[in-house]
Each structure stands twice: as structure tokens, then as C-alpha cells.
Image: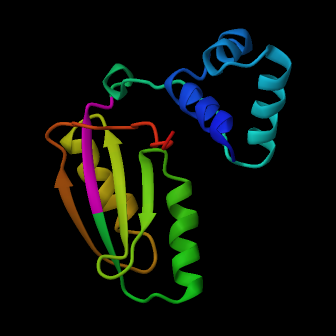
Amino acid sequence: MDELDRKIIAELQLDGRQSLTDLAARVGLTVSPAHRRVRYLESAGVITGYRAMVDPRSLGLGFEALVFVTMKQEDRTTLLGFEEALAQIPNVVQAQRLFGDPDYLLRVCTADLDAYARLEDDVLAAIPGVQRLTSTLVMKNVVIDRAYPVNL
């Protein structure tokens, strides 16, 4: 990956909807080479997709919790089953497996505290292999979905 690829990535992280003409001008290329580079970055898996950033409150999801999950056992079958179950829960908007204890960190968005309590009690705690859930309520998002540093 060269400096031009990094410039393209930086620009697309700022505005993934900009036209190829605008992108090419911002990185100092003509449209055809810029288009080829973008397609290459997509096919190589560097650019993994494009999406709209949405305010969760506008969808009625004004409550957010970080949930630390400790598993009873850490065998492959249990962990894969847990991860597959998480993939089916739309309110889990981020899930990360961690080294050490706890085993997972989840970011969960719901309408309110009552909805979160139901989700934790009826869904998350019921997933086979879960030993303990520890929740921390989010007071305020300070930095969220920041673009990755490209080191130009």
C-alpha cells in the first residue's frame, strides 16, 4: 500500500459517498486510476464496506450498556455457539473476544433500562456457557466510530 492508497482510504473514511471525480481531485489523480485503486482496495479487503452513520436515538435506542461476559468454559464449541448466538441479537451492535478475564466485551443498545434488563435476563444470560454478565451503563459517548489513523 502506497501513499496514494492511504490518501484514498483517509478520504473515503471522511466521506464514503463522495464521487470518484471528487475523490480523484482530492488525492491528485484522474478518475480512471482513482477508480482502479478503489476497486483494488475493495477486492483486497482493505475497504470492507460502506454504510450510513445513524444516531441510535433517532431509532428509539437511547440506552447503551457495555457488557462484560465471563464464560463457564472456553472450549471451541461453547465459544463458537456463544458467538453465533450473539450474531442473532440485533441489539448487540459490537462484540469483542478478549484475552484474560472477562472473555467478551459487548456494546448493547436498547430503548431504555427496562428493555436492557429484559434483554440481559431473557436473552444474554440464557445463552449456553455464560457464567456471569457485568454491565456498565454508558453515560456519554465521547469518541465513537472514529476513522482509523492512516499515517500519511
List x then y, in percent, for residue 44. Answer: 77, 49
Residue nearer the viewer, 13 or 36: 36
In the displayed structure, 131 sits above or below 91; it is below
| Residue in the picture at 19% in, 45% down | 138
In the displayed structure, 99 sits above or below 63; it is below
| Residue in the picture at 27% in, 54% down | 66
| Residue in the picture at 17% in, 37% down | 140
List x then y, in percent, for residue 145. Answer: 40, 37
Residue nearer the viewer, 126 or 136: 136
Q: For residue 84: magenta?
A: no
| Number of numbered discs | 0
List x then y, in percent, for residue 95. Answer: 44, 58
List x then y, in percent, for residue 115. Answer: 28, 43
Q: Quadrant of residue 132?
A: bottom left
The answer to whether residue 41 is left or right of residue 51 is: right
Q: Quadrant of residue 55?
A: top left
Q: Mainly helix, strand or loop, the magenta region? A: strand
The answer to whether residue 22 is left or right of residue 70 is: right
Q: Quadrant of residue 149?
A: top left
Residue nearer the viewer, 34 or 94: 34
Seen from this angle, which residue lies furthest left? 139
Q: For residue 62: magenta?
A: yes
Q: Which region shows up in magenta?
A: 61-67
In the displayed structure, 26 sits above or below 129; it is above
Residue nearer the viewer, 43 or 22: 22
In the displayed structure, 66 sits above or below 103; it is above
